Amino acid sequence: MADPHSHFWVYENKIKRYAAIHRANCGFCNQGEGIGVGYNRLHASWRGPFGSLDEAARQIFARPASLHGFMFCNRCMKWEPEAPLPRAS
């Protein structure tokens, strides 16, 4: 079984209409529990865990009408140009 710390989670902010990909062990993510302060489940949600960055990105692209954009967490993720994101199908 894969290490759960290698999983990815998607945080979706329903008010600001964006999503962010986090690693499971990120301090903001905390295995999909968030930081516990200022987090309102009516306005935001965590989706996951996903076994790969590709799976997490596909979750975001499956909901394009509800989101204005997405980002990678600036704490736990760095853009890797040699690992492109999948295109919406």
Image: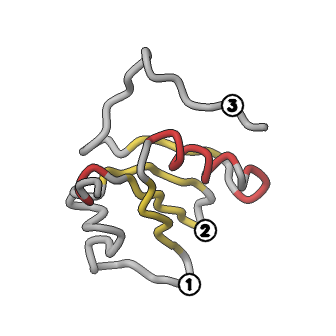
Is the Cβ of the residue at disc 2 closer than 8 Å to that at disc 1? yes
- Would you call the spot at circle 2 few (<14 residues within 10 Å), some (14-19), or many (20 or more)? some
Q: Mark 2 is on which residue type?
A: Lys
In the picture of the structure, the residue carrying the numbered disc 2 is: 14
In the picture of the structure, the residue carrying the numbered disc 3 is: 87
Indicate the secondary structure of the residue bearing disc 2.
loop
Cα distance between the residues tagged 2 and 3: 22 Å
Residue 2 or residue 28, whichever sits in front: 2
Split into 4 quadrants, where in the image is the C terminus? top right
Residue at position x 38%, y 52% in the image: 8
In the picture of the structure, the residue carrying the numbered disc 1 is: 42
- Of the numbered discs 2 and 3, the one sitting upstream in the chain is 2
- Would you call the spot at circle 3 few (<14 residues within 10 Å), some (14-19), or many (20 or more)? few
Q: Mark 1 is on which residue type?
A: Leu
Q: Position of residue 43 (x, y in %)?
A: 55, 77
> Left or right of 61: which side holds 74?
left
Q: Position of residue 81 (x, y in %)?
A: 43, 17
25 is higher (above) or lower (below) than 80: below
Q: Position of residue 54 (x, y in %)?
A: 52, 39
Residue 3: quarter of image: bottom left
- Of the numbered discs 2 and 1, the one sitting upstream in the chain is 2
